[in-house]
Every structure is written in C-alpha cells, then in structure tokens.
Amino acid sequence: MMTLNKTELTIIFLFKIILLLLSQPGFSQSSENLEEKNNSHPSKSRSQISCSYGLIKSNEECMTIQMPARAYLDSSGRNWECERGYKKSMDQCIKIEVPQNGYLLEDSKYNKGWKCNYGYVDTKNQCQKIRVPLNGYLDGTNKTLGWACHYGYQKTKEDCVKIILPSNSYPTIQEYGKGWICHHGYEDKGKSCDKIQIPKNAFLERFGQGWACSRGFLKKGEACEEIVLPPDTYLNDTGNAWKCKRGSKRVGETCEEMSVPENANIDYSGNSWRCNPGYRKRNELCLPMRN
C-alpha cells in the first residue's frame, strides 16, 4: 500500500474543503459576477443589472413597461410612443382631431399633430380658406396672411393696391415703404425722381442714388474742389485727403521731418517712431530697460 507524505495529505485536505464550499447554496465562483434574475442580464461592465427589451428597472428588479392603448415601444425598448394619429398626453394616447381641410403630421411631439392644407390657414383650430384679393396670389412663405401681391401692386390690410409710379422709377418687391425706387442716376424727391446733377470732377456712386468726388478732389457743398498737396505729402488710399511722407509728421497744414532719437526706429505708419527692443520711451528719449 502506497504511503502519502505530509505535503500530499495537505493538498488533498485543501481540495476537499474547496469542493465543500462550492457545493454550498448561493455561492458564486467570482465576486465580480452578478446573479442573473428573470428578464435581466449583467451589463457590459458587469457592475449592475440591465433589463431586457420592454422591461424597466425598479427596486433592483425588471418590471414590464406599462403602455396605454394605441402605444408601442420605441427602438430603445425603454420608452413608449403613440401610434400615428394619436398624441401622448400624460400616460395616455389621445386621438388627434384633424379638422376638415387639414392633414396629419408625422411628428406630433412638439405641435398639434396636424397642419392645414395649402390654401387654408389655422384659425382657432379650424382650417379656414384663405381669401386671396384681386391681383394677389397664394404664398406659403407668408405665414400671417398666406397671400402676397403681384409685382406692381402693394399689400394693404386686405387688398392689393396698384403702385403709382413717378417718372424714372420702378416698383419694388417690398411690402412696405413707397413701393417704388428711382432709376440709376435719379434721386428720390418725395413724390418724384429728379435727375442727379453731377458737378465737374465727380461721378455717380455705385447704386446711382448720389454722386461723389473723383480722387484728388473734396466735396464742398455741390461742387468738388481740388485737394492741394503741401510739400512732402501724398494722397491717402481713399483719395480724399493727404498724408505726410514716411519720416515726417503733420504739423497743422504742413509736414515736418521727424527727429528720431537714438535707439529708436520709424514705425510701420511712417509718421511716428518707436524704441528698439530692450528700450522704453520716456518723453522724447529711448532709455534702457532695467532687469
């Protein structure tokens, strides 16, 4: 008969203890695993119970979602929605009452669930036919009235009135204002469009509603006067004023050469100076910065 040594006896004893523990009720092989209950399964993280489709967690149990009539589960399986033609109200699905000349909308969460047909307007939950006046037409973009006037007519409260055009003008598409605008080269004088009188050395502005002086001239009343350039100056970018050349600065109506101190340089504008790096301005000098 084979005799077991002390070490082998110890291993057999421990193995029997492990088998005994595994046979005990409620024992889990891993403390990280969760007991799976009816209609549930461990979540991906295995840290909590996740309910199956159509169930909702309540007090660590999975309960069937209670739905009213005319309802169905959404794609998540956690909520319910009402069938087409019904609208959610508290915990019920109520029928959407579509008035005559109206139609159901696909989404009824944030609206009445219906809309009036083209040519009709919602008036106190009824679809009333839009009254289009003479010289008007149905306009779906106009949510207030649902109609607009043809070109050459202007909308009042209930009608389309013909726009009376003065000479040298044309109608606009705007619903407000006079309803007309002067042609290019003419200016609005209230009830008429008068030809713009352009003085010498001037030109019509871009939109033709006024005039501006040519480059090198300045507007003075109804005329354009030439800009006289003092010595060491040049016209600015717009051409309606002058600037001093680089290295000089303006003093009254003339330009004087700048006095640039030691350790300074003329800045980007060309009409002032700044201290070099490592120096700071004090009065008219550039002094070294202290550490």
Image (cartoon, helix red, strand yellow):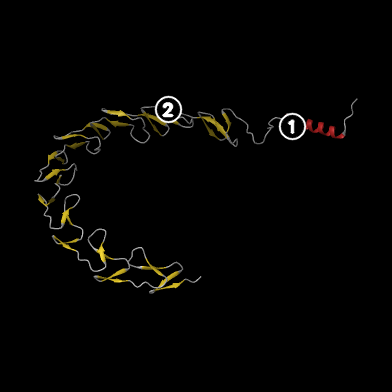
Residue 241 occupies which quadrant of the picture?
bottom left
Q: Nearer the viewer, residue 220 or 167?
A: 220
Instruction: Please report the residue visible at 81 percent of the width from the left and 33 percent of the height from the top.
Output: 11
Ranked by sequence position, the earlier of labels 2 and 1 is 1
Q: CA distance from mark 2 to mark 1?
A: 50 Å
Q: Are marks 2 and 1 in contact (CB under 8 Å)?
A: no
- The percent position of residue 249, horizontal first and vertical second, equals 30, 69
Q: Nearer the viewer, residue 291 or 82?
A: 291
| Disc 2 crowd, CA 10 A, few/some/many (<14, 14-19, 20+) | some
The correct choice, above or below, for 11 with respect to 268 in the image is above
Q: Nearer the viewer, residue 161 or 23?
A: 161
What residue type is disc 1 on? Answer: Leu
| Disc 1 crowd, CA 10 A, few/some/many (<14, 14-19, 20+) | few
The kind of secondary structure element at disc 2 is strand
- The reply, left or right, for residue 278 in relation to residue 142 is right
- Of all residues, the one furthest to the front in this rendering is 231
Q: Nearer the viewer, residue 139 or 239?
A: 239
The correct choice, above or below, for 72 with respect to 254 in the image is above
Residue 127 occupies which quadrant of the picture?
top left
The correct choice, above or below, for 147 with respect to 214 in the image is above
The kind of secondary structure element at disc 1 is helix
- The percent position of residue 155, horizontal first and vertical second, equals 16, 40
- The reply, left or right, for residue 189 in relation to residue 26 is left
**Badge number at residue 21:** 1
- Of all residues, the one furthest to the top in this rendering is 1
**Badge number at residue 71:** 2
The correct choice, above or below, for 108 with respect to 262 in the image is above
Instruction: Please report the residue visible at 19 percent of the width from the left and 37 percent of the height from the top.
Output: 148
What residue type is disc 2 on? Answer: Ala
Location of the N terminus by quadrant is: top right
Badge nearest the viewer, 2 or 1: 1
